[in-house]
Image (spheres, grey):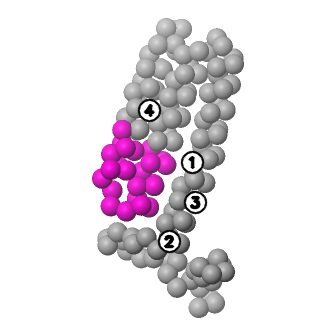
């Protein structure tokens, strides 16, 4: 049973993590606008890093320090990646980056005041 926990499960998790990171890199290269690229990189890469950190923890179950550091890394990445993606998306929107022509709607158009950085509600318009 210990061979499965320390060899096979980590190997599968590393392969899954690498596959998700590959998908993230393909998404960054192939998707048409900044918001889709941001989505691909933040979601897939975060899941890939999580899989690899879990693989590290699973392969070093006997060492509590490695397991705890892996958990801390997962927590750090899961807390910072969404915030960073949000800030990149907001900066792109405020800079006036043109969305992909296939984008259905811009829900902030006409509602966001770039000078005061306030968002008007539907009732205020």
Q: In the shown orientation, is residue 24 left or right of residue 93?
A: left
Secondary structure, magenta segment, majority class: helix
Marks 3/4: CA–CA distance: 25 Å
* Secondary structure category for the residue under label 2: helix
Earlier-in-chain disc, 3 versus 4: 4
| Residue receiving disc 3 | 87
**Residue 51 in the figure: left or right of residue 60:** left
Q: Which mark is residue 95?
A: 2
The CA distance from mark 4 to mark 2 is: 33 Å
Lower sequence index among marks 2 and 1:
1
Res 24 → quadrant: top left
**Residue that appears at 66% across and 26% down:** 69
Residue 27 lies in magenta, yes or no?
yes
- In the rendered image, residue 104, in percent from the top left (x then y), is placed at 37, 74
- Chain part drawn in magenta: 22-44
Disc nearer the start of the sequence (2/3): 3
* 125 to 42, vertically: above or below: below
Q: Whole-Å distance between the Cαs marked 1 and 4?
A: 16 Å
Q: What kind of element bears circle 3?
A: helix
Q: Nearer the viewer, mark 1 or mark 4?
A: 1
Image: 22 above or below 2: below
Between disc 1 and disc 4, whose residue precedes? 4
Circle 3 packing at 10 Å, graded few (<14), some (14-19), many (20+), is few
Q: Position of residue 72 (x, y in %)?
A: 67, 32
Residue mark closest to the camera, 2 vs 3:
2
Quadrant of the image for the C terminus?
bottom right
């Amino acid at each position: 049973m210990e061979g499965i926990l320390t060899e096979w499960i980590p190997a599968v998790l590393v392969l899954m993590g690498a596959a998700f990171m590959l998908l993230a890199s393909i998404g960054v290269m192939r998707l048409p606008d900044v918001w889709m690229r941001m989505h691909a990189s933040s979601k897939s890469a975060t899941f890939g890093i999580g899989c690899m950190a879990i693989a590290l923890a699973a392969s070093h179950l006997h060492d509590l320090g490695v397991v705890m550091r892996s958990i801390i890394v997962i927590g750090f990445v899961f807390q910072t990646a969404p915030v960073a993606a949000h800030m990149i998306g907001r900066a792109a929107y405020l800079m006036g980056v043109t969305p992909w022509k296939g984008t259905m709607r811009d829900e902030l158009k006409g509602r966001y005041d770039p000078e005061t950085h306030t968002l008007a509600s539907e009732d205020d318009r």
